Structure formats: C-alpha cells, structure tokens
Amino acid sequence: MLIVQKFGGTSVGTIDRIRNVARRAIATQQQGHDVVVVVSAMSGETNRLLGLAQQISSIPDERELDVIASTGEQVTVGLLALAIHAEGGKASSLLGHQVRILTDSAFARARIQDIDDKSVRETLRAGKIAVVAGFQGVDKDGNITTLGRGGSDTSAVAVAAALKADVCEIYTDVDGVYTADPNVVRSARKVSRISYEEMLELASLGAKVLQIRSVEFGMKYQVPIHVRSSFNDNEGTWVVPEEKSMEAVVVSGVTATRDEAKVTLSGLIDKPGIQAQVLRPLAQAGIVVDVIVQAHIQNGRTNLTFTLPGSDLARAKDILSKAGADLCPPEQIKTEENLSKVSVVGVGMRSHAGVALKMFEILAADNIHIHLISTSEIKISCIIEAKYAELAVRSLHDGFGLGQA
C-alpha cells in the first residue's frame, strides 16, 4: 500500500515526539508499504514566528508573513528526516516548492491548484520515506504561500489524492471523531466510520478534528481518511463515502460554535438586489456571514438578519454604517453578541422525519430560546445564547441517544 501519514503540531511538539513519529513511519515502511509523512510546525512555533513579525509591523505584508511562517515546517521536516536516519531508516525532506505544491497567490490563505508528484515518487522508488512540509506551497511566480490554519491537513489529503494513495492517516492528539466534544460530554462516543458529508458539516460547525478543506479534497478524490491518535495504535475513525448502514443513524454528532454574533437591518426597501447590496461590502472585506433570515413587513419594507463571527462584528457594523442612509440608517442596525450555534448532523435525517421537532423540544425542555434556525439535508442549526451552549450540546447528545453503544 501507499500510505500518507500526517502529524500535527502536538505530535511533533518535542524531540522525543519527533522520534516517536520516526519510529512509527519506519514501522509502517517495514510492513511493506510506501510511506509519505506530512508534518506541521512544532506546537506553538507558528504563533511564535507570527509574533516576531508583529513586533516589526502591526500590519505586516502577507507575502513576507508566508516566508516567515513556512519556516516552522521546514525545521520539522529536517528534524524528522534526521530522526528517521538515527533510527536506522532512510528519508528525504521535501518543502512545498520541491514537491511543487502549486497554489494561487492568496497569501496566508492560498488554495492548492496542482501537485507535481514526481519528486515524491522518486524518493519512494529510492526506498526512502518522503517527509513533506505541510501548510505550504508555491505560486506560479515562485512565491512561498501558506494554506491557512490547519493547512497541513489539506496538504496531506491533497498529496494523498495526487499519489492515489490507499489511505491518508491523520494523526492527532485525539483518537478519532466523537459524537460530541468529550471535554463537554462525558458520554461522547468515538465513531468508527463517518461519511465525507457528515464530516464536512461537523468541520464547518466547529469540530476541530479535521480542517474543512482537507475533507473537501478527500470527498472530491475519494481518498479514505483515517483519523487516529499519534500516542497509541488504536483504530480511529474512517472518513469514507456514504454507506447504506449510515442512514440508520439519524444523528451522528452534535457540535457548537461559540463566538457568534447577530446583525439585524430594519426597514430596508423591499426590492430585488437589496440582499446583495447589503452583503457585497461585507464579502469584499472578507467577512463571512452564515445564517440569513429575511422577514417582510408592511409598506414595501423588509428586515434582514444574519450571523457572523463575533470577532468581525465591530468591523461589519462600521462597514454597514458607512453604506449610507439610502441603504439603512445606523439607528436601524441592531446587533447582538455572545451567541452560539448548536447543531445536530447526520445523513439519516434524509430518511427520518421529526428530527427538527425533537431538537426544538429538547431545547425547550431546558428553557433555551432559539434566535434563528438554519437547515440542510443533513444538518439542523440553532442560534442560542452562548451561556447555554454546553447545556444544549449535552441535552441534545443525550436526547438523541448518541452515548449508547
């Protein structure tokens, strides 16, 4: 088999842990497999590097930030290759430009466009373990780029897709995907198999096990992803195409995002294109809006409400206020902070009725007020007050019987 193994910052956070990764990679190769290892920077290193840049400039140039941030992974691949040598194995380290992970030029948030797998395959043919720097690539002009937070997950699955690997193993400090955050719900249970679609929803809704773009790559190229612990040999969670048996499970997970805010623009002129007129300046500023609700009122007017990350609220309000009285006077822009989005996810929702009703009844039993509701085929999300987020997650987890084996 051809196996891609990815190790995050905590898994390579110390020299001893790097040695542990080296031994694991060698053991996998000795079982007869070709092995590619993709690594992140050592835990805390990227923040340290970005902190140095902030000391030089309060608004640093993003191209130079990528030059600085990418060195974290460069150190890790060199150390891991040395550790593999010290353990009696053979390895070569490869940076993003050496593999040639081609990206666009959106510095600090680049997207992968193509991967030339020639250098990796040559390394494998030489009987070596290929140690690839995650999180980084290069644009068409040769500039170093980085993929954003969690980008090493994306690097690993993209490399696995390019190589047509049999599996991409994501090693982390947890041993799989759980029905809820085990730190919040004691009865949370590890899921043995989960569909790409469910994992996409969970990743977008606050589950931090996998970066969302890595799941998108896995689903697009049908790469089996195995999420498992770097500290033991236990079977983890397989992220795979949807299987018939998955439909029998109505809800597979509950999750919550904490830092949500709500904006309501009252008395907008109810005309075609008003929504685009409101949201365009926010999109141009890179502010992502989520749940959107429009309520028609009388005299040709409408109210528009949407949610966004709490960290973007002040900037969003300033942008909307500057849009002018012809759009919405500042006194008609109302905001609310300290909200949370709690969600239930499961492909079984497609074939089971009454899931939304049950969710609303469970929240009502705890006297939790729902501000907004958003749904998809396999997800129901409710915006609630942040102080009730953990209570809601625990109640929904118990109410849908997710702790039962």
Image (spheres, helix red, strand yellow):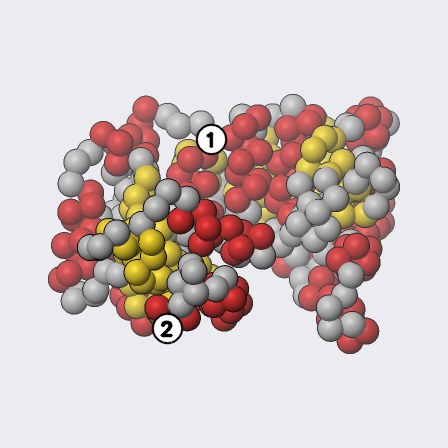
**Is 284 left or right of 364, judged from the image as shown?**
right
- Residue at 57% x, 40% y is 214
In the displayed structure, 143 sits above or below 158; it is: below
Q: In this rendering, does residue 141 appear at all?
A: yes
Question: x and y percent of residue 284 in the render?
Answer: 58, 52
Per the image, the residue denoted by label 2 is 331
- Residue at 34% x, 46% y is 271
Alpha-carbon distance for marks 2 and 1? 50 Å
Looking at the image, is mark 2 or mark 1 earlier in the sequence?
Answer: 1
- Between 15 and 55, the residue placed more toward the observer is 55
**Quarter-wise, where is residue 133 in the image?**
top right
- Residue at 66% x, 41% y is 111
**Is 295 left or right of 83, judged from the image as shown?**
left
Question: x and y percent of residue 348 in the render?
Answer: 27, 34
In the displayed structure, 287 sits above or below 127; it is: below
Q: Amino acid at mark 1?
A: Val
Instruction: Give the quadrant of the C terminus.
Output: top left
Q: Are marks 2 and 1 in contact (CB under 8 Å)?
A: no
- Between 228 and 380, the residue placed more toward the observer is 380
- Residue at 40% x, 68% y is 329
Q: In this rendering, does residue 174 appear at all?
A: no
Label 1 residue SS: strand
Per the image, the residue denoted by label 1 is 240
Q: Amino acid at mark 2?
A: Glu
- Between 324 and 7, the residue placed more toward the observer is 324
Disc 1 crowd rating (10 Å Cα; few below 14, some 14-19, many 20+) is many
- The disc at residue 232 is none
Label 2 residue SS: helix
Question: x and y percent of residue 311 in the render?
Answer: 51, 67
In the displayed structure, 75 sits above or below 389; it is: above
Instruction: Give the quadrant of the N terminus.
Output: top right
